[in-house]
Amino acid sequence: MKKVLTVAGSDSGGGAGIQADLKTFAALRVYGTSVITALTAQNTLGVHGVHPVPAEFVARQLDAVLSDMDIEAAKTGMLVNADIIEVVARKVKDYGLKQLVVDPVMVATTGGSLLAEKAEAALKKELLPLALLITPNLPEAEVLTGRKIKTEKDMRECARILHDMGVSFVLIKGGHLEEEAEEAVDILYDGANYYRFTKPKLKINATHGSGCTLSAALTALLAQGLPVEEAVARAKEFVFQSIKGAFPVGKGVLPVNPLAML
Ligand SMILES: Nc1ncnc2c1ncn2[C@@H]1O[C@H](COP(=O)(O)OP(=O)(O)OP(=O)(O)O)[C@@H](O)[C@H]1O
Ligand SMILES: Cc1ncc(CO)c(N)n1
């Protein structure tokens, strides 16, 4: 069984972050390890508190996992602040992690900041050049590129700008493109070609953890040796089924259910 790693925050409500990642890893039959960057007091209604883990202890968790296990692929989610970003970037280099998926988590679906504004520069400078694949949603792509995104053409333009920052593959998630859209369109750019992935847009309010689940599924599938384009198609299908298979949990945005297909 391939071994993978998530570096992310804990969601006490079980819908996003570490909890979504480990469910996804198990569903896709990879061995999941986890380095926790923060505790969040969170439920389906919102983020009620963030308790960051000291950067030195993030480093200690990374050393514990990476010195012992042969990690095939890793993802990052909520990284909280610039100190943690720097530690993660250093360890990725030190241990020669090659398949790194960066989900540049900034704000929760329910609102609530998950990354200090000052840390955006560190994310761009330190981590993006080490990423095999980055998976921003539209608001994240706008912050990282300083551009507004209204159309698919804008998505392609932002993908190109992010590729120029040193990322091999850029996947821009269009879940937020148009409230009334019939399709959820994602655009992948590899520096030469654009690939368009679409699924019908499900009309249910069940997207808490959709981004985390997508990047965790990509990490699992890359670890299993799939080429990026194929991993994106399979991961998107996995998220689609996870949204479709959501069930009532709490009073707010439903969490996706990565176990839906088991
Ligand atoms: N209503 C929907 N129906 C089908 N697919 C969707 C829907 N909403 C989002 N998706 C897909 O889910 C994946 C995650 O996209 P999204 O833009 O929601 O990420 P995100 O905003 O990072 O998620 P998160 O809620 O975890 O922050 C993408 O592949 C997107 O196209
Ligand atoms: C811990 C955590 N990571 C990521 C997200 C983004 O969905 C969230 N809401 N919570």
Image (tube, helix red, strand yellow):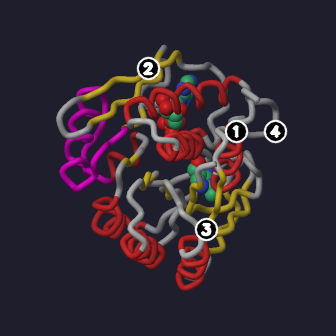
Q: Is residue 134 left or right of residue 115?
A: left
Q: Is residue 143 visible?
A: yes
Q: Amino acid at mark 1?
A: Ala
Please tell me whether mark 1 or mark 3 is closer to you in this view: 1
Amino acid tagged 2: Thr
Q: Which label was assigned to residue 27? A: 1
Name the residue at 50% across, 47% down: 223
Residue 40 place in picture, x, y as percent: 68, 64
Residue 152 in percent (x, y) is at 29, 26
Compare residues 236 and 249 and report the one nearer the observer.
236
Residue identified by numbered label 2 = 198
Label 3 and label 2: CA atoms lie apart by 32 Å
Query: Under 8 Å from ligand 2: the CB of mark 4?
Result: no
The tag earlier along the polypeptide, 1 or 2, is 1
N-term mark: 3 or 2: 3
Q: Label 3 to label 4, Cα distance in Å?
A: 26 Å
Give the magenta range.
144-171
